[in-house]
Image (cartoon, helix red, strand yellow):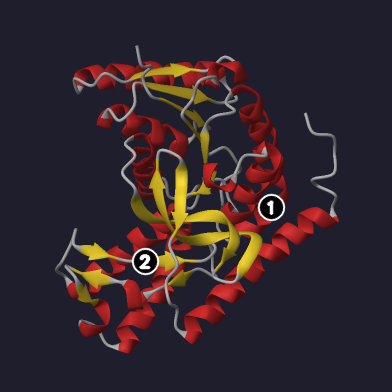
Amino acid sequence: MAKGKKVTVIGTGNFGSTVAFILAMNGSCHHVMLRGRNYDIAKGKALDMSQAANAARQHTIVKAAKGPEDMEGSDVVIITAGAPRTPGMSRDDLLFKNADIVKCYAREIKEYAPDAIVIVVSNPLDVMTYVALKETGFPRQRVLGMAGILDAARMAHFIYEKLEYGAGQIRATVMGGHGDTMVPLPKFTTVAGVPIEDLLDSEEIGEIVRKTRNGGAEIVNLLGNGSAYYAPAKSTTVMVEAILKDTNQIHSCAIMLKNDYGYSDIVSGVPVMIGAGGAEKVINMALKPLQQTRFKNSVASVQEMVDTLYKANFFDDDKK
């Protein structure tokens, strides 16, 4: 008998809990495992979600992990654990604090869920994806960062705000690192198949691009304590469903580049085909010269943070 699909969510804060809840509600997997620092909190949330799944007539069971061994058999493991951004804090400020957290969980995944596909959401996202890849030793297609789907969703929202029509029909594309250097791509953005450049002038598009880059920081500043979690959580479950259902859908995700867009051995967001094996194919697009320059700057920004980790001998301790 084939086993049911299992997803482990590491981190039980607003974001991790929302990811688990969406998975419980849409029934895309049979078993969700919540792993957090506080077992009682994880168990309480798991019970609440399992009861909600029954109210929704879904088959998903949510449980709390007592230890790392409970992630055994996971098809997908999502790393959401980490310190959140606060007003005035950049994603870069979180570098070493969250790198230590991701390193710890990546080693647990390597030991207890060696066949899983890993989705990283902890910030700074591209660097944390790099850390998870290095610490697990998994092939690049099985360690992905969730960013492009979220950034594209934010861009689509700002386009709708400007147009006031086309909701649900806007397909935006964003490449590069998840941060101030991200590269929104109006050239590959449409509304019901109509290029956005046919619907808005260059000034309006420029405003949308700026708002997209600042989308996460705007929410952080408005909330005052914490960061966005509804849109990021939904964006993450889009990736999970593409993997579990083997849909071969194309989404922008952070992945270790290997002769892609002219770069290797660094993580950045590019369009990939997502299926049962993870990122099964990188999709190459023809970028305009300015977009190439912006992507280069974005890659350099991630490289600088990775270099900072290497200079601090972050990867040099004994592997478990």
Q: Please name the amino acid that badge 1 sits on.
A: Leu
Residue 77 in the image: above or below residue 179: above
Res. 245 in view: yes
Is the residue 153 above or below the residue 295 in the image?
above
Residue that appears at 31% across and 20% down: 60
Tag 2 secondary structure? loop
Element at label 1 = helix
Q: Is residue 207 left or right of residue 105?
A: left
Q: Gap between marks 1 and 2, in whole Å?
A: 26 Å
Q: Residue at x 41, y 19 (%)?
A: 46
In this view, 168 is above or below 166: above
State whether residue 275 is above or below residue 299: above
* Residue 120 visible in the picture: no
Instruction: Please state, as top left, top right, bottom left or bottom right, where the N terminus lies in the image.
Output: top left
Of callouts 1 and 2, the N-terminal one: 1
* Disc on res. 138: none
Q: What residue is shown with label 1?
A: 95
Q: Position of residue 171 (x, y in %)?
A: 27, 64
Q: Position of residue 104 (x, y in %)?
A: 69, 33
The amino acid pointed to by label 2 is Thr
Farthest residue, direction left: 165
Q: Residues within 10 Å of mark 2 (few under 14, many from 20)?
A: many
Query: Where is residue 146 drawn, in percent x and y?
Result: 47, 50
- Report whether 168 appears left or right of 260: left
Q: Nearer the viewer, mark 1 or mark 2?
A: 2
For disc 2, the marked residue is 173
Q: Left or right: 314 with respect to 211?
A: right
Dot 1, how many residues are within 10 Å of its Cα: few (below 14), some (14-19), or many (20+)? many
**Image position, residue 279 (x, y; %):** 46, 48
* Residue shown at 49% from the left, 86% from the top: 289
The image quarter containing residue 201 is bottom left
279 or 227: which is nearer to us?
279
